[in-house]
Amino acid sequence: MDSEKLIHKITEKKALKDSKELLDYVSESGENTKEYIRYKTLWAMLQTGNEMDEETINDGYKAVKRNVKGRKSSLYINVVKYAAIVVFALLGGYFIHFADFNNEIAMNEIFVPKGNRTSVVLPDGSKVWLSNGTKLVYPESFVGDFRNVQLEGEGFFEVTHDKDHPFIVNVGKHRIKVLGTKFAVVAYPDDEQVKAELVSGKIQFDIHLGGTGDNYKSLMVSPMHSLVYDKTSGKVYDSTIPDGFYDYWQNGVYSFKDERFDSLATKIARIYNVEIVFGDEELKTRTFTGTLSVDDNIYTLMEAFKIASGKPFEYTFESGKIYINK
């Protein structure tokens, strides 16, 4: 099966299990499996606009158009649209491949590098927005009693309601059960906390208590509240969602109030793909109030922090790192 025919079947939303031709093609070799998952995942990312600006789309389109000849059918347009997003994905450093292929169910894996954002439509129509060093693993189609996905990093979910098939976000050993709702999860493996933020609907935060098996402590999250689990102490904190919640997910603007510099440094490192190194422990404890945008220039941002700081500090850039000293 050539690439154009494979893309054509994917753009027709032909499920693997519903097409003997697709299933035979994927079963032929591991390379065919990878090719299918690569195309399928990229097409899913394309469905929600993928946070691409018009210039990026046009550049990708032009680059492909110069090398594609033939009739301008709907298939041709789909191929060019697909190729444009491939150009975007490669330039942005996105990593997309299959995680497993078993029992006719393929697993998609998307990794969004630091300093980037994207979105994807899942097989059930649910939408997920991902950003800044985040990995999402999900099946090509949901089967069985539950709709399971795995997340490392941060994502905002709009889950399609299906009371008979709960949606579950697995974050390490912990999980979040959903029926149909809007919520966000922040669960980086190297962070000390796991956070669930509920906008509307109903979610259950299952905290794994150690050992093997289903040993969970289940907590309900109230709408417009966040539940934070501290991995070190085992404590759980409940708080209201800040006013700037939507700005961050919809517009890439992060609002903060009296937040410590070391906490902001973690956010800055993920958004701007830099590492911040503090030369003095006291610098970490300084607090700031304001906003930062994914579109901000990192140099301008650091100048703003320097001006806003009650005590002076100096900073230098070197090989992707920002060194901050008194």
Image: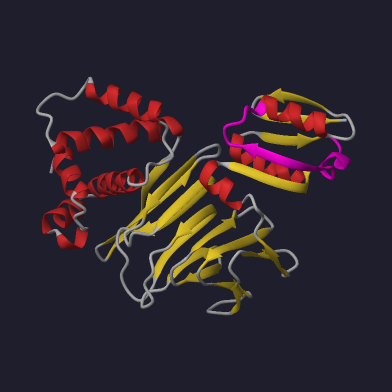
- Give the colour scheme shown: secondary structure
- Determine the residue positioned at 71% across, 46% down: 256
Asked whether residue 287 appears in the rendered view, the answer is: yes
Tell me: 309 left or right of 39.
right
* Residue closest to the far front: 243
Image quarter in which the N terminus is found: top left
Tell me: 166 left or right of 320.
left
State the residue in front, 199 or 111.
199
- Determine the residue positioned at 51% across, 38% down: 116
- Determine the residue positioned at 61% across, 30% down: 296
State the residue in front, 215 or 217.
217
Against 144, residue 109 (above or below) is above
The spot of residue 35 in percent (x, y) is 26, 44
Quadrant in which residue 195 is drawn? bottom right
Quadrant in which residue 307 is drawn? top right
Extent of the magenta region: 279-298
State the residue in front, 196 or 109.
196
Quadrant in which residue 38 is drawn? top left
Against 94, residue 218 (above or below) is below
- Determine the residue positioned at 67% across, 45% down: 255
* Total tally of numbered discs in the picture: 0
The spot of residue 172 in percent (x, y) is 55, 63
Image quarter in which the C terminus is found: top right
Tell me: 31 left or right of 221.
left
The spot of residue 253 in percent (x, y) is 60, 41
Q: Is residue 325 magenta?
A: no
Tell me: 182 left or right of 16.
right
* Residue closest to the far top: 66
